[in-house]
């Protein structure tokens, strides 16, 4: 697999905010390090373009978007802000008795998350990675399980900072579909965030035209383009490391058919190379 260097890895977007001497120094240092390591490319994920007039950089602004929205302190207002069809799904989960349960155990969340990504044909991160995230971020990292009676049907790891809540690693089992587990899960994150005083719900990044993109639109969130910039180092062209790339379709289908226990064994080794 071709090596790459991201700024930073495993995030939706980030980047350098001010056009100052410090920014230029960081930018130059990133390029120098990428060249020293001999990676395929250096990749920036930004909310605003950084290298519009620099021919050394390739740009893409029509592939990914991010979704953010202000939330109210009142549950009724937030529920009414969800479009009718998705609001009905949230109410379905409530009517069926779903309940959110916060946990301090990353392994409890990892189990349901592993099921979810396996169904999507994606290798899962290691349990240790989840443990480290919880250890490092502490109270800013919330682990939420969604229960249907005694069964965990969905779960999500959310991050909180400066009034913003970001549900980051989340998913549900096959059983979640019948009880609207995923819709209830995001509602529960929003409800808890509002009660704590958070006022921005960050629904994260999605690729245009995908199921997750449509899901967030159905929730009443509007997409904001993300600007991806690539400095080619050893690579000859911009990478297409995404599930929509036809060359990955066979691998995705094979992974979905793999026994869950085997996928959980192999996933952490493969996921290290996926950003």
Image (cartoon, grey):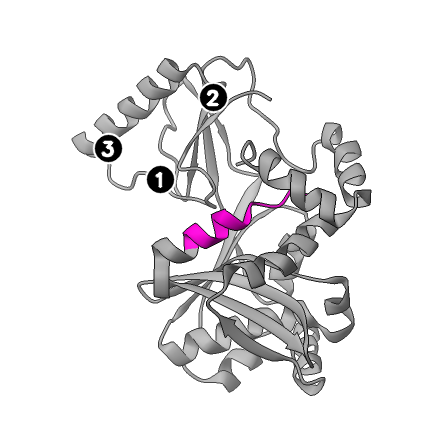
The residue closer to the viewer here, 144 or 46, is 144
Q: Which mark is residue 29?
A: none
Q: Looking at the image, is mark 2 or mark 1 earlier in the sequence?
A: 1
As helix, strand or loop, the secondary structure at mark 1 comes to: loop
Q: Residue placed farthest to the left in the image?
A: 21
Q: Is residue 150 left or right of residue 163?
A: right
Q: What residue is drawn where x is 63% and y is 58%? A: 111
The N terminus: image quadrant: top right
Q: Residue at x 61, y 34 (%)?
A: 270
Q: Give the mark nearer the N terminus: 2 vs 3.
A: 3
Q: Nearer the viewer, residue 127 or 225?
A: 127
Q: Picture quarter containing residue 155?
A: bottom right
Whichever of callouts 3 and 1 sits on the residue coming sooner in the sequence is: 1
Residue that badge 1 annotates: 15
User: Mark on residue 41?
Assistant: 2
Query: Which residue is disc 3 drawn over?
Result: 23
How far is disc 2 from disc 3 in space, using C-alphas?
A: 20 Å
- Asked if residue 75 is positioned above or below residue 260 in the image, the reply reads below
- The local crowd at label 3, few if under 14, some if 14 to 19, many if 20 or more residues have their Cα within 10 Å, is some
Quadrant of the rendered image containing residue 73: bottom left
Whether residue 184 can be seen here: yes
Kindly identify the residue that appears in the image at 57 percent across and 45 percent down.
125
Q: Is residue 127 magenta?
A: yes
Q: Are the two marked residues, 2 and 3, in contact with CB atoms closer than 8 angstroms?
A: no
Q: Which residues are magenta?
A: 122-133
**Side of 105 where 19 appears, left or right:** left
Q: Position of residue 194 (x, y in %)?
A: 42, 77
> How much space separates mark 3 and mark 1, taking CA atoms?
10 Å
């Amino acid at each position: 697999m071709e090596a790459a260097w991201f700024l930073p890895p495993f995030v939706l977007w980030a980047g350098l905010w001010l056009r100052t001497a410090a920014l230029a120094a960081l930018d130059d240092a990133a390029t120098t390090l990428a060249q020293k390591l001999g990676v395929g490319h250096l990749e920036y994920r930004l909310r605003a373009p950084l290298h519009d007039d620099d021919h050394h950089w390739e740009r893409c602004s029509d592939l990914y978007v991010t979704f953010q929205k202000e939330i109210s302190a009142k549950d009724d207002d937030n529920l009414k802000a969800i479009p009718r069809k998705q609001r009905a799904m949230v109410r379905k989960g409530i009517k069926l008795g779903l309940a959110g349960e916060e946990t301090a155990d990353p392994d409890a969340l990892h189990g349901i998350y592993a099921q979810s990504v396996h169904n999507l044909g994606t290798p899962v991160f290691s349990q240790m990675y989840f443990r480290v995230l919880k250890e490092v971020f502490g109270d800013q990292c919330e682990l939420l399980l969604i229960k249907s009676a005694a069964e965990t049907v969905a779960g999500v790891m959310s991050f909180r900072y400066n009034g913003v809540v970001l549900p980051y690693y989340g998913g549900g089992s096959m059983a979640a579909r019948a009880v609207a587990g995923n819709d209830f899960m995001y509602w529960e994150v929003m409800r808890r965030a509002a009660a704590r005083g958070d006022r921005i719900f960050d629904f994260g990044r999605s690729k245009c035209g995908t199921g997750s993109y449509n899901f967030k639109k159905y929730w009443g969130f509007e997409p904001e383009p993300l600007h991806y910039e690539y400095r080619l180092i050893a690579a000859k062209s911009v990478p297409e490391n995404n599930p929509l790339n036809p060359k990955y379709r066979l691998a995705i289908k094979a992974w979905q058919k793999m026994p869950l226990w085997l996928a959980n064994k192999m996933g952490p080794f493969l996921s290290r190379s996926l950003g």
